[in-house]
Amino acid sequence: MSEFEQYYRVLELEPGATFEEVTQAYKDLAFVWHPDRLPKDNTRLQEKAQKKLQEINEAREQLRLSNMKYQTLQYSASHYSAASAQKNPTEKTYQHSAASAQKNPTEKTYQHSAASVQKNPTEKTYQHSAPSAQKNPTEKTYQPPHPNPDLSGKDYSRANLQNKDLSGRNMSYANLSGANLSDTFMHKVNLRGANLSEANLFRANLLLADLREANFRGANLVGADLSGADLRGANFMGARMKSGDRLLVKLVGANLAGAIMPDGKIYE
């Protein structure tokens, strides 16, 4: 894997993504891994967050510099082409066709002789001014291997998954009933239809997770962050989410349409 492919991977992008996509991915990951969003007393997660921020900052900066160089090359190539076209309006006629090459087999030798170099000192520069992307025509088609295996339908009932990093995993319809998921990082995890009844999700990070039709009956969600999560049709009957009238779960931007709340009411 090349160095630049690794930078794209750090930002969870495929090589060839636009710089606009790079910028957006950087903002998303910087938000997710900001140390202030993680438990202050969890040294391991705090250190991991600092390392992640360093990685995404470096990846974004290197891809930004690469984009600037590419734009400069493009501008230089187009500017030189326009200038040379004005100075040499008949230049296209100088380029011999396949047929003329057969008639004049020595023409190619003449073009590269010392005399022609003196007449056209910038010819070599012009020939190599095209963007370096031409050297790697298949770069955008590179498909990086998915780092996370498919865990859909797996049985993790009563499993101890505390402090694990399950971000981005496909765990749809998995059985996590009674599992210990406290302080577990599950950013963008797919838990659609999963059974999380009686699970301990204390301070779990479920930011932007897919939790449609998930079963949270009797689960402990105190301190969990479900910001931006899709919770349509999820069942929270009996789940611990409040202390008195105070909500202890982050639900900023979450979609709760049709969800069954702890008191049995359907969220509209």
Image (tube, helix red, strand yellow):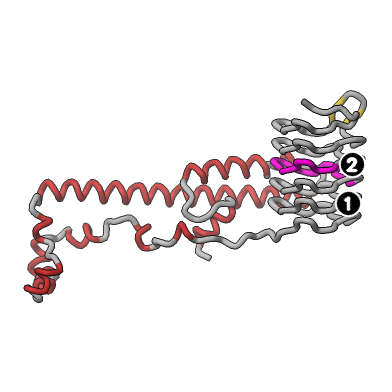
Crowding near the residue tagged with mark 1, few <14, some 14–19, many ≥20 C-alpha atoms within 10 Å? many
Write down the residue under mark 2.
219
Identify residue type, mark 2: Ala
Q: Main secondary structure of the magenta part?
A: loop
Q: Quadrant of residue 39?
A: top right
Q: Which mark is residue 84?
A: none
Crowding near the residue tagged with mark 2, few <14, some 14–19, many ≥20 C-alpha atoms within 10 Å? many
Q: Is residue 142 magenta?
A: no
Taking the spot 91% from the left edge, 54% from the top edge, the residue there is 158
The first of marks 1 and 2 along the sequence is 1
User: Is residue 188 toward the left or the right of residue 129 in the image?
Assistant: right
Q: Which mark is residue 179?
A: 1
Q: Nearer the viewer, residue 95 or 69?
A: 95
Q: Position of residue 60 (x, y in %)?
A: 52, 48
Q: Which residues are magenta?
A: 199-215
Q: Nearer the viewer, residue 261 or 201?
A: 261
In what element is the residue under mark 1?
A: loop
Taking the spot 86% from the left edge, 36% from the top edge, the residue there is 236
In the picture, the quarter occupied by the C terminus is top right
In what element is the residue under mark 2?
A: loop
